[in-house]
Amino acid sequence: MTRDVKHFLQFKDLSREELAHLFARTGVIKQRFKRYQPYHPLADRTLAMIFEKSSTRTRLSFEAGMHQLGGAAIYLNTRDTQLGRGEPVEDAAEVISRMVDIVMIRTFEQEIIERFAAHSRVPVINGLTNEYHPCQILADIYTFIEHRGDIRGKTVAWVGDSNNMCNTWLQAAEVLDFNVHVSTPPGYEVEPERAGLFGTDHYEAFADPMEACKGADLVTTDVWTSMGFEAENAERMKAFADWQVDAEMMKVAKKDALFMHCLPAHRGEEVAAEVIDGPQSVVWDEAENRLHTQKALLEYLLLGRIEK
Ligand code: CP
Ligand code: NVA
């Protein structure tokens, strides 16, 4: 059973045109917030946030964001709910979606969130799965636009693991028409099908991370061991040793290239301290923009297009 509800489960669930609207709304909502202008369009609306993995930014930005828009957010984790004791996802979706107006889920397999959404009466937002992290890429692209303008036609260099962040960058490139240069160690290459690619025109794979970074407008990376893959940590540390984003890599990118990382970061592993703490890094803006882009997303999913 699938209900006619608008969800955000993968980046490609939003069209180029919807994204343009969201980015414009983000600007309006961010300015209002910075000027302490109250804006409460979600009064009496409730967000349920279900976490099966740890979080700082995602929890905080959704919880603070709902509050700032006049609504409320409820934090649930697997340990304290019946989901952790085997209640079927479909049953949980039926019940939870009768009590709240919108749901955000951070979980393991994408399939779990898809099953939840199929049984939900209300919009469901992907707050990270093993496969995707679409809310983060919304913030990343908004941050790029703030610093450098339109991302169309630009080149993003992805160095490291072909994980949920990498997959989502690849989807975003197809929707928004930019290019991604991906460099991963052997054995960790992108699997186009897993990345949910609906064309392959917008990415190129490079064996050498320096080659991937050449001429890039943005260099970005993420942890070598994502949540849920901790058992592979020792093996990954060895395999990824040459895939640290360092000053040499930034030097071959465009002179004004930005550096991004969704955080949390490990200095000395996937990124050198001089890069993440250096002048090209916009990681704090990127983290802050989670709040503003998600407020625009919540407004859009709950109220549709608001222009005022
Ligand atoms: N980037 C991100 O999603 O951070 P958290 O894991 O802290 O939510
Ligand atoms: N790829 C990381 C992102 C954390 C925000 C993970 O899934 O753990």
Image: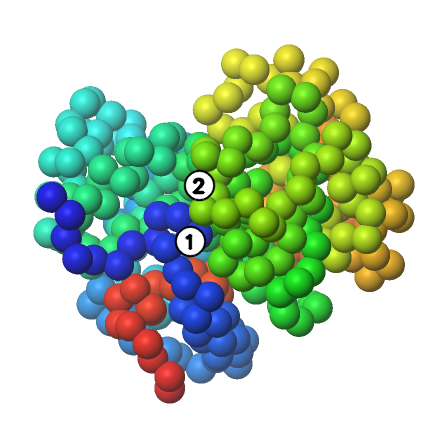
Query: Is residue 291 placed above or below 70 in the rendered structure?
Result: above
The residue shown at (20%, 58%) is 5
Q: In the rendered structure, which amino acid carries the disc numbered 2?
A: Gly
The residue shown at (81%, 53%) is 215
Query: Is residue 267 placed above or below 256 in the rendered structure?
Result: above
Q: Is residue 112 left or right of residue 118?
A: right
Looking at the rendering, which quadrant does residue 76 occupy? Answer: top left
Other residues around mark 2 within 10 Å, as few (<14) / some (14–19) / many (≥20):
some
Secondary structure beneath label 1: helix
Residue 12, disc = 1
In the rendered image, is residue 160 in sight?
yes
Q: Is residue 117 left or right of residue 248?
A: left
Residue that protrudes farthest toward the bottom in the picture: 308
Query: Is residue 39 placed above or below 228 in the rendered structure?
Result: below
Quarter of the image for the N terminus: give it: top left
Q: Nearer the viewer, residue 268 or 11?
A: 11
**Mark 2 sits on what residue?**
196
Label 2 and label 1: CA atoms lie apart by 9 Å
Along the polypeptide, which appears first: circle 2 or circle 1? Answer: 1
The residue shown at (54%, 61%) is 176
Residue 45 position in % (x across, y down)? 22, 64
Residue 164 position in % (x across, y down)? 50, 38
